[in-house]
Amino acid sequence: MLQNNIVAASAASVTPSDTGEIRALALYVGGAGNLRVLTTNGDDVTFTGVPGGFLLPLEVRRVYSTSTTATSIVALR
């Protein structure tokens, strides 16, 4: 089982963008939907059916507006 101890020093609301860059150790998804991200390693991944209240323990540098339907996304840094 993968165990992650995420300790964030700050948090900020995320506005999905196909060009904007963010830095996040993890993402909190408040409203259910699909979430398309670009990881810090350059992987373009779409997570389908992410439930509301979910913490995604993945380092990301972009949350795309295209294909993202999840809402109330918060970047933990």
Image (cartoon, grey):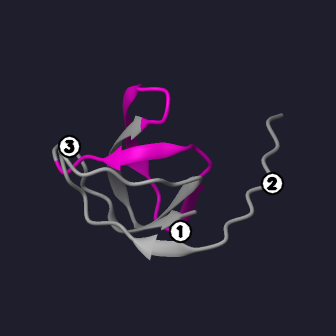
Instruction: Name the residue located 20 percent from the left edge and 53 percent from the top edge.
Output: 17
Figure disc tally: 3
**What residue is shown with label 2?**
5
Q: Which mark is residue 32?
A: none
Instruction: Give whichever of 56, 41 is nearer the camera.
Output: 41
Left or right side of 32 for 7: right
Residue 13 vs residue 69: left or right?
A: right
Q: Identify the element where label 1 is drawn.
A: loop
- Amino acid type indicated by mark 1: Gly
Amino acid type shown at disc 3: Ser
Give the quarter of the figure containing the C terminus.
Answer: bottom right
Q: Kindly indicate whether the residue at mark 3 contacts the one at mark 1 (C-beta within 8 angstroms).
A: no
Q: For mark 1, what is the residue?
A: 53
Residue 3 image-quadrant placement:
top right
Tell me if mark 3 has few (under 14), some (14-19) or many (20+) residues whose alpha carbon lies within 10 angstroms of its own: some
Disc 2 residue type? Asn
Residue drawn 26% across the image and 65% down it: 15
Residue 8 location (% of width, % of height)? 67, 66
Separation (CA) of disc 2 from disc 1: 18 Å
